[in-house]
Amino acid sequence: MLTSIFATTLAGMPCGQDSDCALMGQTGWRCMGDPTAPLPAGNCFQGWGHHTNSTCSCQEDSCGTYTNVTAPPAGSTKYLMIGDSVSMGMEKDVAATLLPHNWYTIHNPGNAANANKGWHCMTNFTTVPNVTAPFDVISYNFGLHGIAKDIEMLSTSNYTSLITSITDFLLDYKKAHGTKLLWVTTTPVPNDPVWTEDGPCNVTSQCIFPARFNSDVVEFNKIAQEIVDKAGIPTLDLYTFVVNKCGGPGYKTCDGFQLPHNVHYTAEGWTALASQMSAALLKL
């Protein structure tokens, strides 16, 4: 359970990152650009590597809206994919692979971002128009946004509490509906220079932006693994798959598979990740 301090109302208070806000509150739980701040607008960039010229405050974020959702075919396996841009990058290939097996695939609306947004949006994510029956399968991942050295950054204690609460929510869903769950590990960050405003690397196309470190991925994955193992939830280890594909721990580049200075992938990379994902889902 999250400690009571996270439920403190902090709406409108200045912040530098999500962990400054009321992570368990109904208001003031997300560090965002303050709509009441003076110009220049959109100057909410406080965080590691930035000058302290922030106009951020603790607010409520949107969970997104499902649009143009078609009803699942009768008798199909209804599958919900929850995650950030990595799962979004895999979604099309995963859906195409699962379709011949009579699976219906849908991703949460937009980017689920970090575990803070995920926790506040779980009810929204699992309530889908035109999908009246519960989901048969749900996969989930949160990690890359929480380690980013920007306004989404979470401490390890924040991450532990939030992943525990998300997992508890999904376990309750499973208990009510018999849903199969799959945790997906957070994928690695190349050992590249990271962006800072004053350099030495301050060109976003030539360094990791926002700054991320693979050591944080390893730590977050360890935390999450302990939680899901205790809950009896199976894991798809995409972290190890990518590391092995790219030359081992501490790799700097992964030509043709992962984009340069980036946590995202080429077309070949997305296809390979989707193949791993589809295979794991079909084995559940």
Image (cartoon, rainbow, N blue to C red):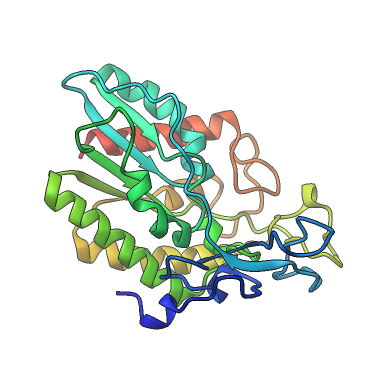
Quadrant assignment, res 162:
bottom left
- Camera-nearest residue between 45 and 254: 45
Residue found 55% across the figure and 29% down from its top: 268
Q: x%, y% of residue 63?
A: 47, 48
Quadrant assignment, res 11:
bottom right
Quadrant of the rendering where the N terminus is positioned? bottom left
Please determine whether, in this image, residue 31 is positioned above or below residue 252. below
Residue found 33% across the figure and 50% down from its top: 123
Number of marks in the image?
0
Residue found 83% across the figure and 64% down from its top: 197
- Camera-nearest residue between 190 and 63: 63
Please determine whether, in this image, residue 169 is positioned above or below residue 112. below
Q: x%, y% of residue 98?
A: 31, 24
Q: Specify whether 219 is left or right of 283.
A: right
Residue sticking out furthest to the front: 36
- Camera-nearest residue between 181 and 62: 62
Q: x%, y% of residue 83?
A: 44, 47
Residue found 30% across the figure and 68% down from its top: 226
Q: Specify whether 233 is left or right of 122.
A: left
